[in-house]
Image (spheres, rainbow, N blue to C red):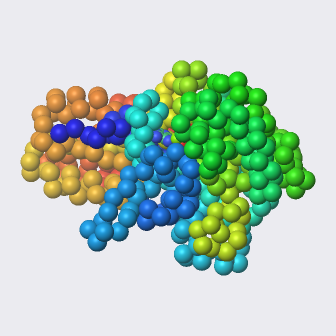
Amino acid sequence: MQKPKGTYDVYGDLGKQIQYIEKVIGAMMEKYHYEYVRTPIFESKELFHRGVGDSSDIVTKETYDFQDRAGREMTLRPEGTAGVVRSFIENKLYGRATLPVKTWYYGPMFRYERPQAGRYREFYQFGVEVFGSNDPLIDAEIISIPVNIYRFLGLKGIKVKINSLGDEESRTAYKKALKEYFKPYVNELCEDCKVRFEKNPLRMLDCKVDHEKEIMKNAPTILSYLNKESEEHFKHLQDYLKAMEIPFEVDETIVRGLDYYTHTVFEVEADIKEFGSQKVLCGGGRYNQLVETLGGPSTCGVGFAMGMERLLSALEKENITFKEESLDCYLFALSENEKEYVAYLSNLLRMNGFSVTMDYNQKSFKANFKQVERLNPKFVLIIGEEEVKDKKITIKNNHTKKEEKIKEEHLIEYLDEEIEM
Ligand code: ATP
Ligand code: MG
């Protein structure tokens, strides 16, 4: 039996790497005072059609759709935002006394894409969504989150690219200009772009096929179509980023793959040439209409999502690995007769905060010391007949090689002190 195409298994060092990053993310979200949310992995198909948008690649080509046994149309979530917005509305979080509501999520997403480096059919995203504020300070704050996470993990060469798609009025004016500009060239564009021209010309700028063509490069850009209010928003965002000492560049080609963005859009890239279009580690933006589109009261929103797999590859490329948590105690019994006492001790130690593993297979003394060499615990506890009888444990400090006999009642205290030293 083999795993499905475009998926992967986690074990060994990869598991350690992932668990470390997950810890960093959780700790970072505590510092930012964001609230953890979790929504179902499948939702109604309609949610994604309305939420992500009918002209996005994600919905037109990439969803895993299925009928449940009662014939309901369901979709495995291809992204996190639609579900979080649905939950925000359904649970009436907009009624809270303290706005904005700042949330984060983490979990698997599913897209039927052509599997390749940095692109999987099941992949993990960490993301945030903030509801109830149009303040560009929030936009700057959420941009600082991936930047600080990548910095903390030690990634170098991180690039932040920002752009503004403006408000409804600015975008309408811009779309009109785009249509006029592209009209004479429609036939020269790829099949997808012909559809995008009709449905949402902004999408054309995100095309991976026509990207290099001159007509694309010379297309009018959004920033000259921003109205006063949109211009102000974009300027304040840049001021806040500067104040937070986050280097960025304005890149007018960034429109993002989803339909719902307004004002700020951004991407964070790894500066790794071999990565090609997979160098985008993280992307997001503001979506001031989305809550209303999904049936809630008019509420501003802004968020991003970052892919775990691309982050892992970037760390690998830069040779960044995280040290595994070390093992405190390794226990072994000299004979079957002492195993119950070993079981008792292991429980006592674990409940007092020590990491413990032991010999389960009644190996020889020599085999146990081979095991100790591999696991490199701080302490080795050897339990023989005498130890059980006197409740005095032989403890060897595996690093200093000091060996002592300690009474069970002083064991925890002793280990705590030794670890302090
Ligand atoms: P791309 O343009 O690379 O297809 P996207 O616009 O589809 O990206 P988003 O939907 O904004 O990406 O997702 C945000 C992040 O999630 C991406 O920057 C990337 O790190 C990650 N991501 C997206 N699709 C995949 C995938 N199929 N496999 C692994 N990671 C992915
Ligand atoms: Mg994509």
Closer-to-camera residue (296/409): 296
| Farthest-out residue, right | 228
> Residue at 57% across / 55% down in the picture?
53
Report the side of 101 relative to 345 (left or right): right
| Farthest-out residue, left | 336
Q: Position of residue 297 (x, y in %)?
A: 67, 74
> Residue at 30% across / 65% down in the picture?
68
Vertical side of 214 occupied by 350: above or below: below
Report the side of 166 relative to 304 (left or right): right
Whether residue 185 is visible here, answered yes or no, is yes
Determine the image quadrant of residue 281. Answer: top right
Q: Position of residue 205 (x, y in %)?
A: 66, 37
Closer-to-camera residue (273/176): 176
Closer-to-camera residue (16/282): 282
Q: What count of labels does the image hold?
A: 0
| Farthest-out residue, top | 273
Whether residue 244 is visible here, answered yes or no, is no
Quadrant location, the N terminus: top left
> Residue at 59% across / 40% down in the picture?
194
Q: Position of residue 226 (x, y in %)?
A: 84, 48
Q: Position of residue 192 (x, y in %)?
A: 54, 39
Report the side of 157 relative to 408 (left or right): right
Closer-to-camera residue (315/301): 301
> Residue at 29% across / 28% down in the picture?
373
